[in-house]
């Protein structure tokens, strides 16, 4: 196989086909006035992006895009149009001129710049030959985790990930400020007798929800070895809770996972992440330097067979550190997604009218 | 032609970004604007990932050197290419853009959630989610005195 | 001549980690505030978190004075593999500014919040405030381009909702917050695209490393596009004319705690980041860069100064007036920075700090008055001086400083700008400053006339003096405006070192 892409390279062909699909879907979203159509198309856009991401050798990102883009975003958007309205107004064509001009100009700059970029897949471009490659060479020694993306995300650039967890927490705070924490007394209690036509849903949900939760845990811990990690696991865990709410009623779910618990768990996740960093700091290292997670005298006490040999001792701090912070990520992401869902789902029409009168 | 094909990704990403931006600027409906914003943000992610792709590479999950999997991956490539760009006998794609875009996707959904929450409250306060109607309704406040505590 | 080298604000164990604690401290406080059982507790946590950050900033001041710049490698990995914090004299000036603004704002919020925000939202408001502060502190401390984006978003996401809760008093807060969200996110995404282009050209994300590699690369379409996107993106966040459309709404309708803090810090942090990129990352000799500064940045800044001052003169609502004034003042700051000399950068940064002080005073005084009378439009402020003399006097000091009355900090700040412009031979900037100052005098004059010289209308509700909890921070700020107007050696020294660090090209 030669190093330059040619027209007959299958990977390139698939890549181009997927991008053309994305362009078509984006065009459809621009044109449609129905918001429900736009949301479903956006879900399709996310899923096609996820497939494209797999073709481009980024399975972690594909996973995240699928759960976040096609999952959470769609739920939140649907919640929003249920609380507002489903159709956009027709604007007159004159208002499209200025935006079109701006977009054409910016697009022109982008295309002008794109001509200076290296070809797709160029292994000797600055991006691929410098820091990216250095990670691949250094990670097996420094961290010892096969999934280099997790190694970079959780260890080398762990501080960025900390910032990201804080962003999610901030979003939870923001949505809670806007929409409150869940339904007030106005929400009708679930009907005492659910008709027989709900039996299938209930039984299926009872089977699926624990499996989904288990899958979330699998993704969480498997992130070291393959695609996965805290973010994806957190969203999947939230999906289990959301499924429960959809089938059994919001009131029941809120009794099981109370809004207060959700908020506290979200804070706890951030504090856990920061706590790991502070512990490393107190043991003599810098913030989030997992090599210092275990004080030296403890390492001597871990039995040799558990460590798997002398060179693994250095990796234990890294493995544990990564595991703990991914746990922090899981807690915050799951709790925040649940809080956001409660905010949207718990807002009924009665609440809206009451707010308007205040 | 080869140039167009090898840079098609970047051109497509540019068009996608502009589609998202166009929706944001031209749509009067607040919810649709949020969707446009989300498209704009995810297209940026596609840009970064395109930068990180390596021809003949595989996902950056390190394979045991010398294992059957490593040998199988290596067998598909030209030996000179492998020697120049491989790490321990396998060619990988770049892990760094993946990390960055994971963060960006999460930031994007956070923004989406907060934006939609504000839009819901706007609907409750103004009775509409169309920008022009809200502007007309807002003029009421400019003529009124401020509220007491 | 004050020597900061002897300043040891914190024990060495903490000082060694000060760059990180500066940001992580308020973050942990934010989580604690979200947990807090009562509004009072969350307020105390907020004050503690802000004071801690200010303490760390002071510790860093000593360190930077001793070593020139402080580096901190997160995770123990050196760049370009890891993320490094890099704080030099300019960064420490920004950190001090943001953390002290945070202390003043959080002290003020004890009384102001109950008047403006529903009771059940207080704990989350304090949490959001601390998150915003931590994000801004991270933005000015980090040495990694993508990390700057993450902290930019940390500071922004909480802010959107925090502005929107001003809807209790004025429902226009909601569309203003939404508008800010859209524009702010577009700005941040443009920034990410720009960083992507630079990343494509250099292969690294560490700003110092990028600068070194770009110096050898020279101009290319990729680098130029990266430059354009970063500047436009940060320009939106910094409310650089003509991208400032979101600012008047956001500052006018937000709860006063948020307006005070944002007016002092948010645009400033983005200006600082932009200056970092323009002066440190982009190669010095690049024709594109210099052409941009001379032909795009400076004229836009000058236009902002004049046009927005005119808009402020014609505004009827006070906070909108002050908001347009803020955009005009951002123009002043950018004029100073656009000179691209050490004197210009020092003057620009000095003006940046002075403006933060002045605007905080003005917004805080208004906030104190708003507790009793609301005061949305200028005519409602008529005759307030009789009933609330302390607030009115503080407002007058802040206003005088803004207008550049001698013996105030504002006068010194404008003087330095003029001197730097003359030294660089840019006479037109002096003309712009003069015209804009006259216009400032006009709208300040309108405000002073309403407060002091107009009788209160017969049937209008009487204002009450603001509570001590508000007057205390207010008068500290006003007092500083006066003191530094007379003896400005402290801020001058900081600004000089900062300007040197920014332009001098040193670490």
Image: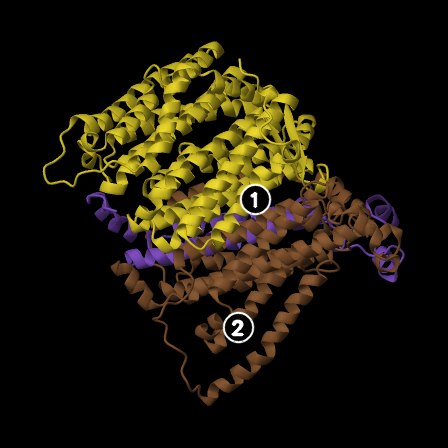
Chain colours: A brown, B purple, C yellow
Q: Residue furthest bottom?
A: A196
Q: Callout 1 environment at 10 Å: few (<14), some (14 to 19), or many (20+)? A: many
Q: Residue at x 39, y 53 (%)?
A: C121
> What percent of the width, then of the height, locates residue A132?
73, 44
> What percent of the width, then of the height, locates residue C284?
61, 22
For this rendering, which residue is in front, A111 or C491?
Answer: C491
Q: Quadrant of residue A34?
A: bottom left
Q: Residue furthest left?
A: C458
Q: Is residue C383 above or below residue A84?
A: above
Q: Residue at x 54, y 20 (%)?
A: C499
Separation of residues labelled 2 and 1 (CA atoms): 31 Å
For this rendering, which residue is in front, B9 or A132?
Answer: A132
Q: Residue at x 72, y 38 (%)?
A: A126
For this rendering, which residue is in front, B36 or C341?
Answer: C341
* Residue highlighted by disc 1: C150
Instruction: For the residues labelled 2 and 1, say whether their Cβ atoms are less than 8 Å apart.
Output: no
Q: Is residue C450 above or below residue A274?
A: above
Q: Is residue A159 above or below residue A202?
A: above
* Residue highlighted by disc 2: A243
Give the chain of mark 1.
C
Give the chain of mark 2.
A
> What percent of the width, then of the height, locates residue C230?
54, 36
């Amino acid at each position: 196989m030669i190093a330059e892409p040619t027209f007959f390279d299958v990977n390139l062909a698939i890549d181009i086909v997927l991008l053309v699909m994305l362009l078509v879907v984006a065009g459809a979203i621009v044109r449609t006035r129905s918001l429900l159509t736009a949301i479903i198309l956006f879900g399709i856009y996310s899923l096609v992006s996820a497939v494209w991401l797999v073709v481009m050798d980024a399975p972690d990102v594909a996973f995240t895009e699928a759960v976040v883009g096609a999952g959470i975003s769609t739920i939140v958007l649907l919640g929003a149009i249920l609380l507002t309205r489903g159709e956009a107004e027709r604007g007159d064509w004159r208002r499209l001129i200025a935006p079109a001009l701006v977009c054409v100009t910016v697009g022109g700059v982008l295309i002008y710049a794109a001509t200076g970029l290296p070809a797709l897949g160029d292994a000797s471009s600055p991006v691929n030959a410098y820091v990216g490659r250095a990670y691949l060479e250094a990670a097996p020694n420094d961290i010892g985790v096969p999934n280099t993306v997790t190694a970079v995300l959780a260890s080398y650039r762990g501080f960025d990930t900390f910032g990201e967890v804080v962003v999610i927490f901030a979003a939870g705070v923001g949505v809670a400020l806007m929409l409150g924490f869940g339904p007030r007394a106005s929400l009708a209690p679930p009907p005492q007798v659910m008709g027989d036509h709900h039996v299938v849903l209930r039984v299926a949900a009872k089977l699926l929800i624990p499996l989904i939760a288990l899958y979330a845990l699998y993704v969480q811990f498997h992130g070291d070895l393959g695609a996965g990690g805290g973010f994806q696991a957190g969203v999947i865990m939230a999906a289990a809770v959301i499924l429960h709410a959809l089938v059994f009623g919001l009131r029941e779910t809120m009794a099981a996972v109370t809004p207060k618990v959700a908020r506290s768990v979200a804070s706890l996740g951030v504090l856990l992440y920061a706590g790991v960093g502070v512990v490393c700091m107190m043991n003599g290292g810098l913030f989030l330097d997992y090599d210092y997670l275990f004080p030296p005298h403890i390492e001597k006490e871990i039995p040799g067979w558990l460590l798997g040999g002398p060179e693994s001792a250095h990796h234990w701090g890294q493995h544990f550190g990564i595991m703990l912070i991914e746990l922090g990520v899981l807690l915050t992401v799951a709790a925040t997604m649940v809080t956001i869902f409660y905010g949207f789902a718990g807002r009924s029409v009665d609440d809206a009218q009451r707010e308007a009168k205040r | 032609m080869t140039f167009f094909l090898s840079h098609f990704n970047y051109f497509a990403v540019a068009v996608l970004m502009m589609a998202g931006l166009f929706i944001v600027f031209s749509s009067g409906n607040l919810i649709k604007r949020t969707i446009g914003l989300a498209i704009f943000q995810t297209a940026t992610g596609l840009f970064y990932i395109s930068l990180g792709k390596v021809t003949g590479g595989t996902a950056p999950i390190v394979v045991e050197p010398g294992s059957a999997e490593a040998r199988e991956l290596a067998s598909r490539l030209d030996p000179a290419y492998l020697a120049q760009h491989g790490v321990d006998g396998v060619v990988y794609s770049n892990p760094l853009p993946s990390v960055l875009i994971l963060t960006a996707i999460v930031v994007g959904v956070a923004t989406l959630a907060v934006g939609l929450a504000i839009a819901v409250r706007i609907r409750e306060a103004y009775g509409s989610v169309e920008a022009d109607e809200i502007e007309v309704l807002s003029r009421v406040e400019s003529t009124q005195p401020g509220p007491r505590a | 001549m004050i020597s900061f080298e002897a300043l040891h604000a914190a024990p060495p164990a903490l000082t060694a980690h000060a760059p990180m604690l500066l940001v992580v401290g308020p973050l942990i406080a934010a989580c604690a505030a979200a947990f807090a059982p009562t509004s009072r507790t969350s307020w105390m946590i907020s004050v503690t978190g802000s004071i801690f950050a200010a303490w760390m900033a002071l510790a860093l001041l000593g360190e930077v004075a001793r070593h020139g710049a402080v580096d901190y490698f997160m995770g123990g990995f050196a760049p370009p593999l890891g993320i490094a914090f890099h704080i030099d004299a300019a960064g420490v000036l920004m950190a001090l500014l943001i953390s002290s603004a945070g202390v003043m704002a959080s002290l003020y919020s004890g009384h102001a919040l109950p008047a403006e925000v529903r009771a059940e939202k207080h704990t989350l408001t304090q949490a959001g405030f601390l998150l915003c502060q931590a994000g801004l502190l991270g933005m000015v401390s980090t040495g990694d381009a993508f990390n700057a984006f993450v902290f930019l978003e940390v500071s922004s996401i909480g802010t959107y909702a925090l502005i929107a809760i001003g809807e209790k008093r004025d429902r226009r807060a909601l569309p203003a917050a939404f508008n800010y969200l859209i524009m702010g996110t577009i700005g941040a995404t443009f920034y990410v695209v720009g960083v992507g282009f630079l990343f494509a050209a250099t292969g690294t994300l560490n700003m110092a490393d990028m600068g070194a590699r770009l110096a050898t690369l020279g101009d290319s379409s990729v680098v130029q596009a990266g430059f354009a996107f970063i500047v436009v993106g940060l320009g939106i966040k910094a409310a650089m004319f003509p991208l400032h459309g979101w600012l008047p709404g956001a500052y006018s309708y937000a709860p006063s705690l948020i307006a005070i803090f944002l007016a002092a810090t948010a645009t400033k942090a983005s200006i600082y980041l932009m200056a970092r990129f323009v002066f440190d990352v982009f190669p010095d000799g690049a024709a594109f860069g210099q052409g941009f500064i001379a032909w795009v940045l400076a004229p836009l800044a000058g236009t902002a100064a004049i046009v927005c001052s005119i808009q402020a003169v014609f505004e009827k609502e006070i906070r909108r007036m002050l908001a347009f004034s803020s955009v005009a003042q951002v123009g002043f700051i950018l004029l100073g920075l656009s000179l691209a000399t050490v004197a210009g950068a020092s003057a620009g940064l000095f003006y940046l700090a002075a403006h933060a002080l002045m605007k905080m005073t003005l917004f805080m005084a208004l906030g104190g008055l708003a507790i009793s009378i609301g005061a949305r439009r200028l005519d409602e402020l008529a005759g307030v001086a009789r009933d609330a003399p302390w607030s009115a006097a503080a407002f007058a000091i802040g206003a005088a400083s803004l207008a550049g009355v001698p013996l105030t900090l504002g006068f010194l700040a404008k003087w330095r700008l003029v001197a730097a412009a003359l030294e660089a031979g840019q006479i037109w900037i002096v003309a712009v400053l003069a015209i804009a100052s006259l216009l400032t005098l006009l709208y300040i004059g309108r405000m002073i006339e309403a407060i002091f010289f107009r009788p209160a209308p017969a049937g209008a509700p009487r204002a009450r003096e603001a509570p001590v909890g508000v007057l205390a921070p207010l008068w500290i700020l006003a007092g500083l405006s006066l003191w530094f107007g007379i003896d400005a050696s402290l801020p001058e020294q900081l600004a000089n070192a900062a300007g040197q660090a920014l332009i001098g090209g040193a670490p």
